[in-house]
C-alpha cells in the first residue's frame, strides 16, 4: 500500500493540466429578467432557463457552491441584462451582466470558479481567456490546486533523492504512513461537505421550481375567476326578463373555456423528480386536464334563448370545475414554500 501511495504522490507532482479554449459570441436580442442562480452556469427566471455562454462548471462541489454564492451576491434582487446567443425560447444560452455592469461569466472566470468551454471559441471575446489566465496566475479558486500541482517535486526531496534514493523513498513512505489516518478523515469530511452542498443545490432548485409553478397556477386561477365573472354577467343578461339578450342584436361569440398558461410546467417536466411522487403525479394530472386549444361557439340571433342559456351554463360549470384541483395543488406548493422559508430562517 505504501508503494502505491508513493507512486500516486509522484504522479500528482509531475502532471499538469491542458490549455482551455471557448466560443465566440453572435448577434442576438437583449432582454432583462429577475433571476435566481441554480448552479455555476445556470440562471432561472420565471418560465425561462438561462445558461451562461462560454463557461462550464468545475465539477467540484466546494468550488461550485462558491460560484453560486458569488452569483447570488452579484445578482442580488436586481434584474440581469442578457444577450442571447442561442438555445430555445425556454432554455436560452446568453451572456449576462448584473445591474452594475459586470459580466457574470467574466467575473466567475476571474475568481477561478468556472473554466472556459473547450467546445467554444474566444475569437470575438478574448477577455474570457485572459480572465482565466489571470486567475491561474493568481492561483484563484480551482487554480490554487492546479498551480500547486505544477510546482513539481519540492527541492528538499530532489536533493534527498539525488543523495540517497532509498532514504528518500523511505522518508516519503514514513511520512505518508503516519498521515494516512488524517488524510482519510479529511477525505471523509470532504465527502460529507460535498453531499451537504449538493443537497443545498437540490433544495434551491426545488424551491425555484415550486415557486414558479405556484405562480403560474395562481395566475391561471385568477384567469378562471375573471372568465367566470364575465360569463356570469352574460348569463344574467340572458336570463333577464327586462333586457333583450345581446346576441339577439347581431349574434355573439362564446369562448368555451378560459385561456390558461402551461409554459412553466412544460419547461419543467424534466425536473418533476425533485418533488415527491404524489405531488408530481398530481401536477401532471392537473395540467393534462387543462383545456388545450381555444374553442369558440357562435350564437346567431335566431338561436333559441334556452339553447343560449344552456351553452353559457355549461361553459361556467366546466370553468368552475377547474378551480378545486388547481386550488389543491397551489396549497400543496405553498406548504413546500413555507417549509423552505422556515429552514432558511
Image (tube, rainbow, N blue to C red):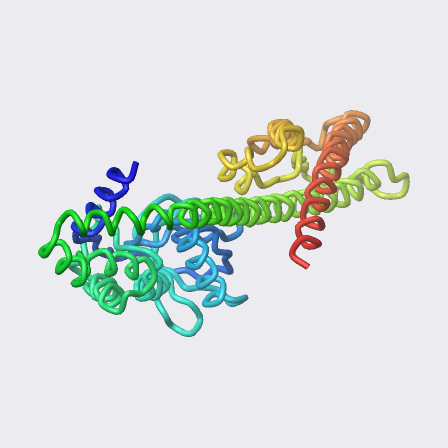
Q: Quadrant of residue 341?
A: bottom right
Instruction: Give me the residue at 21% from left, 53% from top.
Output: 22
Give the camera-side residue of 329 and 228: 329
Q: Where's the C terminus, which quadrant?
A: bottom right
Residue found at x 34% / y 61%: 141
Residue 97, image x, y percentages: 38, 66
Residue 102's place in the image compared with 152, above or below, is below
What percent of the width, then of the height, locates residue 30? 37, 60
- Quick one: which residue is furthest to the right in this view? 241
State which quadrant residue 151 falls in: bottom left
Of 38 and 256, the residue lying toward us: 38
Residue 15 locus on image (x, y percent): 17, 49
Q: Can see residue 298?
A: no
Q: Give the image location of residue 258, x and y in percent.
A: 66, 38
Residue at 61% in and 40% down? 260
The residue sitting at 20% across, 45% down in the picture is 11
Quadrant of the snapshot with the N terminus: top left
Most foreground residue, 326 or 22 = 22
Q: Is residue 138 above or below residue 26?
A: below
User: Along the horizontal axis of the image, is 149 left or right of 165?
Assistant: right
Question: Can you see residue 41?
Answer: yes
Q: Is residue 6 left or right of residue 179?
A: left
29 lies left or right of 155: right
Instruction: Looking at the picture, tell me which residue is in the foreground, 57 or 168.
Output: 168
Amino acid at each position: 500500500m505504501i508503494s502505491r501511495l508513493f507512486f500516486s504522490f509522484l504522479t500528482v507532482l509531475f502532471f499538469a493540466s491542458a490549455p482551455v479554449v471557448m466560443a465566440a459570441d453572435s448577434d442576438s436580442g437583449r432582454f432583462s429578467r429577475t433571476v435566481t442562480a441554480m448552479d455555476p452556469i445556470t440562471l432561472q427566471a420565471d418560465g425561462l432557463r438561462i445558461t451562461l455562454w462560454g463557461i462550464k462548471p468545475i465539477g467540484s462541489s466546494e468550488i461550485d457552491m462558491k460560484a453560486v454564492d458569488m452569483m447570488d451576491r452579484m445578482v442580488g434582487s436586481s434584474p440581469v441584462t442578457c444577450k442571447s446567443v442561442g438555445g430555445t425560447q425556454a432554455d436560452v444560452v446568453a451572456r449576462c451582466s448584473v445591474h452594475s455592469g459586470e459580466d457574470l461569466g467574466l467575473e466567475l472566470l476571474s475568481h477561478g470558479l468556472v473554466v472556459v468551454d473547450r467546445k467554444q471559441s474566444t475569437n470575438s471575446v478574448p477577455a474570457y481567456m485572459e480572465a482565466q489566465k489571470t486567475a491561474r496566475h493568481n492561483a484563484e479558486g480551482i487554480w490554487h490546486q492546479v498551480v500547486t500541482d505544477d510546482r513539481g517535486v519540492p527541492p528538499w526531496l530532489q536533493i534527498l533523492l539525488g543523495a540517497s534514493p532509498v532514504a528518500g523513498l523511505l522518508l516519503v513512505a514514513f511520512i505518508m504512513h503516519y498521515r494516512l489516518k488524517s488524510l482519510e478523515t479529511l477525505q471523509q469530511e470532504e465527502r460529507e461537505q460535498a453531499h451537504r452542498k449538493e443537497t443545498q443545490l437540490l433544495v434551491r432548485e426545488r424551491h425555484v421550481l415550486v415557486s414558479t409553478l405556484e405562480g403560474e397556477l395562481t395566475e391561471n386561477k385568477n384567469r378562471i375567476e375573471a372568465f367566470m365573472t364575465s360569463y356570469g354577467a352574460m348569463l344574467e343578461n340572458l336570463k333577464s326578463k327586462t333586457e333583450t339578450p345581446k346576441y339577439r342584436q347581431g349574434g355573439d361569440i362564446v369562448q368555451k373555456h378560459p385561456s390558461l398558461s402551461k409554459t412553466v410546467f412544460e419547461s419543467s417536466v424534466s425536473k418533476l423528480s425533485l418533488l415527491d411522487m404524489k405531488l408530481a403525479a398530481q401536477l401532471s394530472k392537473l395540467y393534462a386536464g387543462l383545456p388545450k386549444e381555444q374553442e369558440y361557439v357562435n350564437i346567431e340571433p335566431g338561436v333559441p334563448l334556452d339553447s343560449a342559456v344552456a351553452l353559457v351554463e355549461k361553459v361556467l360549470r366546466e370553468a368552475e370545475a377547474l378551480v378545486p384541483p388547481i386550488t389543491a395543488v397551489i396549497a400543496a406548493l405553498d406548504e413546500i414554500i413555507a417549509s423552505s422559508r422556515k429552514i432558511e430562517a
